[in-house]
Image: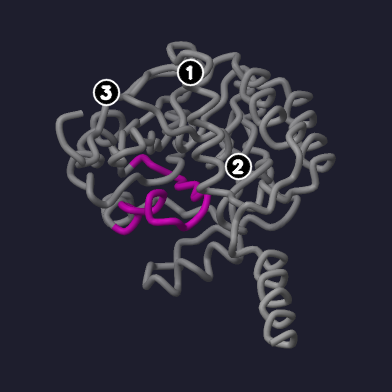
Amino acid sequence: MTDNNPVMLTTRETGNDWCVLPAFLPLPGMGGLAVNAFLHKGQEPVLVDTGLAALGDAFLEALEAEIDLTDLRWIWLSHTDADHIGNLARILERAPRARVVTSFLGMGKMGLLGLDVSRVQLLEPGARLTLGDRELVPLRPPYYDAPETLGFLDTRSRTLFAADSFGALLPQPAENVAEIEAQTLRAGMVTWSAIDAPWLATVDRAALGRSLHALERLAPTTVLSGHLPLAEGNLSTLTALVHEAWCLAPATEADPQTIEAVAALLDSGMEIRQEA
C-alpha cells in the first residue's frame, strides 16, 4: 500500500453463491485490516454489511457492478460499528425494496445514529431469515466487539458468516486465507483479537472452547469474516488458532484497566498511605 487510505479491492466470487466486496484499511505500524461486505445474488438478494463510509463511491460502484439495487431485498447488519454500516443510508436510498435485518439492540443503535429504522426487519431470538431457496440461521459468533452482533449459517451452501470473529491484522491484502503464511496468520489473529475483543484475556476458557467446537460441528464449507480474507475449508485452522491462543494459554490480567488491576492498585496505595 502506498498511503494510509482504505482501498476497495477486486470483487471475488466464492463459488458457493456468495461474493466478497473486499476492502483493505492500512493501520500505520500494524499492517492493515480487511474490511469486507458480502452479497448473495439469489431469489431474494441480501447484502451483508455496507462497508466504510470513506469508500462510499468506490463501494457503491463495486456493489452496483454486481446487482441492480432496485432488486436488493435484504441488508443484514452484523452490528452497528462504523466499519459495518458506513454506506447504509446511501444504499437504502438506492434500494427502495430492501429491508434491514437486525436485532432490537441493533435497531436502537441505528436510531441513536439518526438512521432510518422504518425499514427494519427485527430478527427475534430463534427466528430465521428465509431467502426462497435457503435460510440464514442467526448465531452468536464465539467472540465479538458489540453485543448486538449476529452471524449466520446459510443452510444451502453451508456458508458461515462469523462477523468480526477470526479477524487478523495482515502485512498486505490477500484474496484467501490459504495464501497467508501460518505464523503471519496466527500473529495477526491474536493481535487483532486482543484489540477488538480484549475480554478474551479473561474469558472462561472452557466456554470459549465449547463454542469453537460447536462451530466445527456445523461443518461450514466457507467462512466469511468481516476482517479476514475468504476462508474456504479453513474453519478448523481458524478455530485451532483461537483455541491455542485463548483456551490453552493461562488467563492474564495484563490490561491495567481491568477492575481487578485497578482494585489491586488502589488497595496497594491505601496500604502505603496508612503505613505513612
The answer to which quarter of the image holds residue 128 is top right
Crowd tier of the residue under label 1, counting other residues whose Cα lies within 10 Å: few below 14, some 14–19, many 20 or above: some
x 49%, y 68%: residue: 109
Q: Amino acid at mark 1?
A: Val
Tag 3, which secondary structure? loop
The residue mark sitting in front, 2 or 1, is 1
Q: Is residue 255 above or below residue 226?
A: below
Total marks in image: 3
Relative placement, left or right, of 49 versus 22 is: right
The answer to which quarter of the image holds residue 68 is top left
- Which residue is disc 3 drawn over? 10
Real-space CA distance between mark 2 and mark 3, rounded to the nearest whole angstrom:
24 Å
- Which residue is disc 2 drawn over? 151
Is residue 47 located in the magenta-colored stretch of the structure? no
Task: Give the mark nearest the N terminus, 1 or 3.
Answer: 3
| Numbered label attached to residue 177 | 1
